Image (cartoon, rainbow, N blue to C red):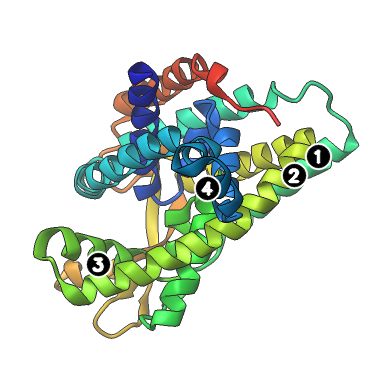
Amino acid sequence: MWKDLISFAWRGMAMGMAEVVPGVSGGTIAFITGIYERLIKSIRNISLFPVQQLRKGGFRQLWRHIDGNFLLALLAGMVAGLVIGIFGISYLLEHYPPLIWGFFFGLIVASVVYIGKKISSWKWAEVLLLIGGAVIAYFITVFSPSEGSQSYPFIFVSGMIAICALILPGISGSFILLLLGMYTFILESVKAVIEDQSLAALMITGVFALGCLVGLALFSNVLNWTFKYHRHPTLALLTGFMIGSLNRIWPWRNPVLWLDKDSGKRLTDLSTIADLERVKVLSELNVFPSAYHGDALFAGVIACFFLGLLLVFLFSRWEKTTVEF
């Protein structure tokens, strides 16, 4: 039992760290580690408010019904992964971005192959959904980010939308927040809660978390139904999402559009900006290593790419824990 709980916690930690990176989905990690369907089923059971289970068998039966041990271990790992991601991966993204992107690029390429093999029969419906999912995810990656809003209703809605992306392989909740113009705002709020115990930041984080819970409850029921009655088409669509997301995590990307945090203006040239801390990147252009504005770290990227491939192979060894509907 303890071995399984530790295994679930490690997977949760990987999911949490992945969610900090805009363009990488925690749902992808859940998918390739064999716990995706089990996670969706557990969330769905909670969202249905299983009062009857509590009345019949008490808390013990309720805990078994919602797969409590699994969820608790996974959640603990995710919280730890988010903290590590916020402080650790954020540092690596700032100083060695090609290495991080190379690693996740390899991770998702291998995942596409691995999950595609789970579809035993490819028919027209699966092929069309694969293409459709790839096209949808690709266009999401090239949308221009909005400026966002700091109002509580918008924060709540952002949480609902981001959590849906979190549990969809290939569509990153962090990247959806970036498109909504909320990524930096939410990330800084979480940091303020951890570092300064700010009450205002706690309110923002709480509203965002509430939106996540509501969105998770609604969307998990939809996914549970599609896996139960349309398993192969669902797998094809999710595989397409991952293929389309590769555009967003290409290791070598040059910024082409920035946002001036002070004025709110979008910039295509930084020559007039003295303090680069005031700007954040809104859009980037994929380039070859030779055209990259910075150290391409080509050998390191290739090594990280193959490390991502290797990890998918290791994660796939845990597939026995997947719940079939």
Mark yes or no: residue 271 visible.
no
Is disc 2 in contact with disc 3, using a CB cutoff of under 8 Å? Answer: no
Q: Secondary structure at mark 4?
A: helix
Residue 212 sits above or below residue 33 on the image: below
Q: Nearer the viewer, residue 1 or 235?
A: 1
Q: Say whether residue 101 is left or right of residue 27.
A: left
Q: Residue at x 52, y 47 (%)?
A: 54
Q: Which mark is residue 229?
A: 1
Instruction: Give the farthest residue toward the left.
Output: 196
- Image quadrant in which you'd find residue 85: top left
Q: Which mark is residue 54?
A: 4
The first of marks 2 and 3 along the sequence is 3
CA gap between label 4 and label 1 equals 28 Å
The first of marks 1 and 3 along the sequence is 3
CA gap between label 1 and label 3 equals 40 Å
Q: Which mark is residue 226?
A: 2
Q: Residue at x 54, y 56 (%)?
A: 216
Q: Residue at x 61, y 22 (%)?
A: 114
Please state the horizontal and vertical placement of residue 103, each as a whole percent of the image.
38, 31
Amino acid type shown at disc 3: Ser
